[in-house]
Image (cartoon, helix red, strand yellow):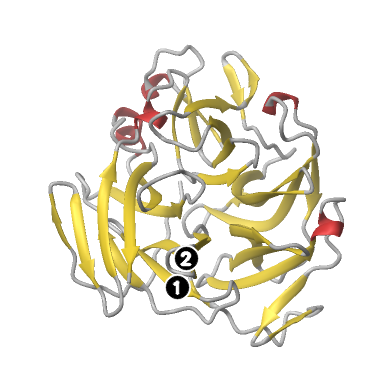
Amino acid sequence: MKLLAFSILFIFVFILNGQSQVQSKDMQIEVNEVDNSMFTADKFWRGADGAASIDLENGKILWLFSDTFIDPQGTGKRSDSKMINNSIAIQEGYSLDKGKISFYHKGRQGKPKSFFELPGKTWFWTGHGIVANDKLIIFLFEEKSTHTGIGFEAIGWYIGLIDNPFENPLNWNIKYIKGSDTFGVIAGSSAILKDKEFIYAYGVTEPSSHEVYLLRFPIDKIVEGDISGLEWWNEDSWTTRKEKNPAPSPLFIGQTEFSVHYQENLHQYVQVQTYGYGAASIGYRLAERPEGPWSQPVIFYQTQLKSPEEFVYSANAHPEITNDGILVTYNVNNGNFNELMKNENIYFPKFISVKISK
């Protein structure tokens, strides 16, 4: 379970019957809550956080989840479930109302295991990924338990390179490549983009104040498992980095997980994340290029919680899904694990639809 806190810029939001409207200086924003039953119906997969999505470019969407509840007996109850560190799902089609989704993890009946696994006492949480040259590249961050702070910390990153991504995921050939030293920045913990030559990975400093950086990898190298061509965006150019200092200037202060995508109707890139702790808000930034400069945050949605022990995090946009607006998920967790096990109104990704117009 991930606990993250950040500074927040508030803009007045009013909510009525599941709909909210925001007026900012340059934009009109309408927000509607969307049914999330696509996630709640499976009798074995009983909730997860994370919820990043990747267009597999074959009419299907890959969903990546981190901490996941699996009920090995299929009773449909979280109270009978076991927790694994990550899972995935494949959605057929690009529509929520017509799409079929299938969930996957490893292990045998009664003993579920994480889909992406590390030997030893550390584990993977999922970042984001992308398809390039018919290969699937998934960024994963390595976590370990601690006796201080919030009980865990990120200690590195990997890529999972899959050369048969269009087959059944249980038959995927996954090659794990350990990331190079990025001086505390977890490459790919957030959004992944691409153009004709490069894959771009947003990364966040962990465990720290969550400065966001942008890194890039030559496509022709990374699809072969070679990450030696890594470059950093610094001020106004791409550079290599062999030492911790001097550090590049961060793009902004973000969080471990967020999304970035190009929005056609705005002709800009949109970055979506949560702000604050507890009943956190959700907001966006805009930029004309992935490198920025990025605008100040605009808060467009204030979440509503049922308990003071609940908290919101991990907002992501899902431009792959056809929707009248931008489809966004966020996660609701509970600091009381016993309550989390009983309350199946939370810990399934929740949907909102966001219309942003000039």
Q: Nearer the viewer, residue 208 or 358?
A: 358
Q: Position of residue 80 (x, y in %)?
A: 41, 19
Quadrant position of residue 338: top left
Furthest-left residue in this view: 16
Q: Which residue is mark 1?
A: 286
Labelled pair 2, 1 in contact (Cβ < 8 Å): yes
Tell me the SS state at disc 1.
Answer: strand
Q: Position of residue 292 (x, y in %)?
A: 55, 78
Q: In the image, 66: left or right of 15?
A: right
Q: In the image, 176: left or right of 246?
A: right
Residue at the spot 47% in from the left edge and 66% down from the top edge: 270
Mark number, residue 271: 2
Residue at the spot 65% in from the left edge and 67% down from the top edge: 185
Q: Nearer the viewer, residue 99 or 206?
A: 99
Amino acid bearing label 1: Leu
Q: Nearer the viewer, residue 315 or 97?
A: 97
Amino acid bearing label 2: Gln
Whether 112 is drawn above or below 13: the answer is above
For disc 1, the neighbor class at 10 Å (few under 14, some 14 to 19, many from 20) is: many
Q: In the image, 65: left or right of 186?
A: left
Residue 130 visible to the viewer: yes
Whether 100 is drawn above or below 184: the answer is above
Residue 334 visible to the viewer: no
Image quarter where the C terminus lies is bottom left
Quadrant position of residue 198: bottom right
Residue at the spot 29% in from the left edge and 31% down from the top edge: 343
Q: Position of residue 23 (x, y in %)?
A: 22, 71
